[in-house]
Image (cartoon, rainbow, N blue to C red):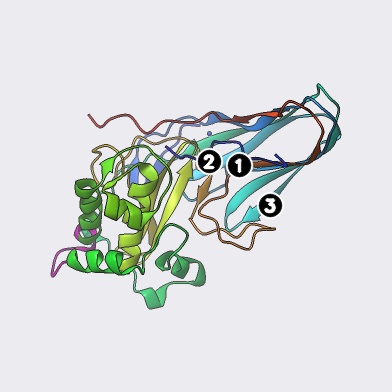
């Protein structure tokens, strides 16, 4: 489970149509589902300068999003949206609140996701030549926070898994199989790819970071996909007609390579974000709330939506 994506940080303090699912046509697609996100803040003393940020669903190749409505109080609160490397972030500012006030920001969306079904002809897929990648794609070959793809242990492990012959699909599956065979699922603090390799334990984050790191060390563009309470990886391939496509895989449980029941809204893709006001690159765009001046004797209470999620159900 994502350990910080659904935690509050308080400082000073989803139309049935035919569709493509990982390039294969599917007869139907789930109806758009309603997704709500935001927060409620209760304060117990004079409060000045509330600033909150959190990711919201955005359009991706495998997801359509429609903003429905917002419920915002007090009336002085303002909500705006910014783009951070493809991730859409809501930013809320509330000038002041009185003791006993409750502030609430609820954003409602309709989100329609493509199902994650393995490509119908995986052996026809190839890994793109790094020289053919554009600037945005090339960054998914580089190290990022907690994905230490140039660490010697990661590089040597990727080399040991290199295949002579076989398909590109087989090669990436070798990285996937290695993670499943060498990392036991165990929920805990976020620690990254090298620690997951050394400890042999971790949850969706560690299994994803290690898979992504091995892919990148093996010159396969890969990135992290974030949904409420969970994450999984996807890697870049070229189809037989030369088109670029991202293939999603589920690291938790024993789902077939390239399949997953995951249908929660995609909140962000990537794992190396530069946030305004923070010089250090971040692994993801997390939820944060900061209060500039708070004079209550009881700490404010922040409740985020959606509540923490769970991993996908066990494979049958």
Label 1 to label 3: alpha-carbon separation: 14 Å
Mark 1 crowd level (few <14, some 14–19, many ≥20, 10 Å Cα):
many
Tag 1 residue:
287
Pointer 2 or 1: first along the chain:
2
Label 2 to label 1: alpha-carbon separation: 6 Å
> Residue 223: image x %, image y %?
42, 56
Q: Which residues are magenta?
A: 163-170
User: In the rendered image, is residue 50 in sight?
Assistant: yes
Figure quadrant of residue 140: bottom left
Queried whether the magenta region covers residue 168, the answer comes back as yes
Mark 2: secondary structure: loop
Tag 2 residue:
5
Q: Residue furthest bottom?
A: 131
Pointer 2 with pointer 1, Cβ within 8 A = yes
Q: Any mark on residue 147, and which?
A: none
> Residue 180: image x %, image y %?
23, 46
- Left or right of 292: which side holds 156? left
* Viewer-side residue, 162 vs 127: 162
Mark 2 crowd level (few <14, some 14–19, many ≥20, 10 Å Cα):
many
* Viewer-side residue, 261 vs 2: 2
Image point (48%, 72%), residue name: 134
Tag 3 residue:
82
């Amino acid at each position: 489970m994502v350990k910080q994506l659904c935690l509050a940080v308080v400082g000073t303090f989803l139309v049935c149509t035919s569709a493509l699912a990982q390039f294969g046509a599917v007869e139907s697609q789930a109806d758009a589902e309603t997704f709500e996100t935001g927060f409620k803040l209760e304060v117990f003393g004079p409060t000045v300068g509330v600033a909150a940020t959190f990711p919201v669903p955005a359009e991706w190749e495998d997801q359509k999003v429609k903003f429905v409505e917002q419920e915002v109080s007090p009336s002085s609160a303002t909500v705006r949206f910014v783009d951070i490397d493809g991730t859409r972030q809501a930013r809320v500012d509330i000038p002041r609140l009185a003791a006993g006030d409750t502030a609430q920001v609820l954003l409602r969306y309709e989100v329609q996701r493509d199902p994650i079904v393995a490509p119908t002809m995986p052996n026809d897929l190839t890994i793109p030549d790094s020289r053919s990648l554009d600037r945005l794609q090339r960054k998914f070959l580089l190290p990022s926070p907690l994905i230490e793809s140039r660490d010697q242990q990661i590089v040597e492990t990727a080399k040991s898994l290199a295949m002579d012959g076989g398909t590109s699909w087989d090669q990436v599956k070798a990285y996937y199989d290695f993670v499943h065979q060498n990392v036991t699922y165990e929920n805990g603090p976020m620690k990254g790819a090298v620690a997951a390799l050394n400890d042999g334990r971790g949850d969706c984050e560690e299994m994803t970071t290690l898979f992504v790191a091995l892919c990148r060390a093996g010159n396969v563009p890969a990135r992290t996909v974030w949904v409420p309470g969970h994450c999984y990886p996807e890697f870049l391939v070229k189809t037989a007609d030369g088109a670029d496509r991202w293939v999603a895989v589920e690291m938790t449980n024993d789902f077939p390579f390239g399949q997953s029941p995951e249908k929660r809204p995609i909140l962000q893709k990537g794992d190396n974000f530069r946030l305004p006001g923070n010089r250090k690159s971040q692994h993801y765009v997390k939820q944060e709330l900061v209060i500039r001046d708070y004079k209550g004797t009881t700490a404010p209470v922040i409740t985020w939506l959606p509540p923490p999620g769970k991993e996908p159900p066990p494979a049958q």
